[in-house]
Image (spheres, coloured by chain):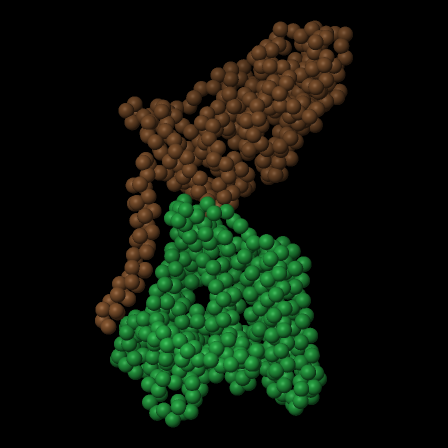
Amino acid sequence: MSGIPRTDLLTRYPWLKRALQSRAFQPTLMMVTLAVFTLAILTGLFGTPAGSRNFGIIFVWIVWWALLIIGIVPLAGRLWCAMCPIPAPGEWLQRRGVVERVMGRPFTRGLRWPRRLKNMWLQNFGFLGVAIFSAIILTRPQVSAWVLLGFVVIGIALSLLYERRVFCKYVCPVGGFIGLYSLVAPTELRVKDPAICASHRSKDCVTGNERGYGCPWLAYPGSLTRNIDCGLCTECLKTCPMDNIGLFIRAPGSDLLKPKGRRLDEAYKAFIMLGCALLYSAVLLGPWGWLKSWANMQTPGHWALYALGFITFVLLVLPGLFWLVAQLAGRAGDQRAGARQLFVDYAYALVPLGLAAWIAFSFSFVLTNGSYALAVISDPFGWGWDLFGTASFPWQPLSPRLIAFLQAGALTAGLLFATRTAFQIAREHSEDARQAFRAALPVSMFLLVVTLAFFRLYLG
Amino acid sequence: MIRREHIALLTIALILIGLPVAVFSYELGVRPSQAAHRVIDVTAAAPEAGGFQPAHVEVAVGETVTLRFRSVDVTHGIAIGPGLGIDLGHVDPGHVEEITLTFDKPGTYTYYCNTWCGRDHWRMRGVIEVRDPAGGTALGVERDPVIEALIAEGVDIDVRLSHGDSSEHVSEQPGVSPSAGRGAEVIAALTVPTDLRDAAWRFSHTPAQGLALLREANPEQSEDVLADAIAHLWLTEVSPETVALYDKNCAACHGQTGGAEGPIAATTAEEPAAFADAGYMWEMRGDVLYAKIRRGGMGTDMPNFGTVFTREETRALVDYLWRLAFDGEGKPLHGGMPPEH
């Protein structure tokens, strides 16, 4: 993978550069998604409560989710963040404009985001909060619509209070995991030559100029090294007077091997995502009906137990086990790094496996229920419409064998990718490859056990 | 540049304001105006969650209306009666089933769920009131001669025989389960009194009373043979439609084979009648069964079906109940003694 030559797509395809430099690029994408989002909210609030016949549920939690986790994130990282409609109203209000660069003071109190919250913890807890209610949020159109509307309201409020896109960078639960998994993507937006940035004084990419805004994600492209910090809004591409921004094809997962950016909050995001994938698979695909009943909030007491177990597993059990594994790895490889550093560093090996697990998990319900999309596109509210003649399209799940085959493929690829990453991280702490191999063994065993657990859940 | 910004703002306004306006204009304005006649949307939910909304619909005589049913929770079965023969089948959550009707005379009809949908399934009903604008209301309680005759006779329709509580009727009950099949083989050798050949007499008397009559005419025959003959006499032809009517409307409580083992039997205020219990049915009159079906049972959770079934359908259901009781040999739907006997 490291043999993939780094290629600047903007140099190779000038038309792409012109498109991305256009101020209409991002608002156009946002308006398309805003239209779909608005329909999803309307159908959620006013359409049938039957999730399988409601556009909001089908298009948000099946179509969008499939596009995001199986397509966009693995290939283009944070591209969704560039077109997401949720922060759009807040950002447009803040900028007092939609397309053009509006000069002057933005419509915001412009507060600085608290230093203590400049991390992923809010996103971690936000995702967990959504996760423990997910059996309700993902199946009940009204609940789903109110949650999405809530995100918009929070986005607007934060835009009016704080500078730039703090909602996306520090609050959005979806943005958090997209950011983490964007580390795996084979694409990146980076400066072509950091030396040019270092010598360039005006730093238009940070301050903005008449062609565009300063980075809404509060990043300095000149020192940008990981996709997690870049929302692909392409403002820097517009503002850079030195033509020093490129969109590169690169070796997948190369961000995982950059020790400088690794943090405990991101490591925990990896545990939360992997743990959630495991638990969702157990609840929704496993043979334990009682567990599904507990998750569905049929009785508050059982749900409280479920939520407690969920949080304990994700925040304590899984990281606790991995802590032991990381220490074992350190000893096996005679590594000198501290316990916390080993724990955090090796946790990045979980990222490719976590993404693969989510892809595999998504195959199960996307390929089973995807055919509902044809019906709801003709009858989005379940009111008996037939706009395109497909309202009666029957539910047609794909063959379970094909789904199992795809899941097995995704998990195997994820395991190999993760094991390789574990070895590369071990190499950072080792003097030679043999030491690194010994250190990577416990981590690889952990990865294997987790993968086998997924195999057990998916393939029986 | 300013033009581009204006286009963007216009597009956003179209999305945030135009889209909702377009959706509701289409649903509330365009669709109804495109329909050739009035469309009445009826939401179906389990009774615990509100049942039918609306539960009362007014239609003028001669007016053509489309009733559009949509389920919002579980699968319901939608039928309209009495006498219309309308069964829309299952309406799954999020799906819509509709029917266009023209009522040519005043009256009251009932739309009801005939697929068990929850604890209070039997409460899930709505009323279509057909009024004659010229003649004012012509509605009223229709008198039923069978029920009126029972009341005049002083018969307590709500009296209930307990299952297995047949000891007090021992003298009248056969020792074995009477079988219509065996009865068909012996009936030709018996002297059958005229009353017993009369369907109206049988309808207003119990098999036990019939046995007493048959015994008088055939004192040399054993009780078992006579009981089989009575079982045979009490059976009439039953159509598949009647069986389907029973399965959809009665089986949830009384069980598909009449064993009172339906899925909600355990939840009713009183244990449902077991029609397969020949001992229970031996003491039962056809007209009382008829009245119970049409009027319902006070405090028993037995709903009234008089607003749902026609009298003919009710009579046919009673005929089927005798089959559940006495037709213990494979329960053929056809055969037995035709009604005119």
Is residue A176 at all visible to an observer of this figure?
Answer: no
Picture residue at 61% right of the left edge, 39% below the top:
B263
- Tell me if residue A59 comes above or below residue A202 in the rendering: above
Picture residue at 32% right of the left edge, 36% below the top:
B36
Q: Nearer the viewer, residue A134 or A406?
A: A406
Picture residue at 34% right of the left edge, 71% below the top:
A25
Q: Nearer the viewer, residue A204 or A148?
A: A204
Q: Quadrant of residue A452?
A: bottom right
Instruction: Give percent across and percent down for residue B296.
Output: 53, 28
Instruction: Give percent across and percent down for residue A125.
Output: 51, 71
- Tell me if residue B63 comes above or below residue A90 in the rendering: above
Residue found at the far bottom of this picture: A199
Chain A image colour: green
Is residue B313 at all visible to an observer of this figure?
Answer: yes
Looking at the rendering, in which quadrant would you find the C terminus of chain A?
bottom right
- Tell me if residue B148 comes above or below residue A282 in the rendering: above
Q: Is residue A199 left or right of residue B335?
A: left
Q: Which chain is brown?
A: B
Picture residue at 72% right of the left edge, 22% below the top:
B177
Instruction: Give percent across and percent down for residue A83.
Output: 39, 69
Q: Is residue A150 left or right of residue A66?
A: left
Q: Nearer the viewer, residue A56 or B72?
A: A56
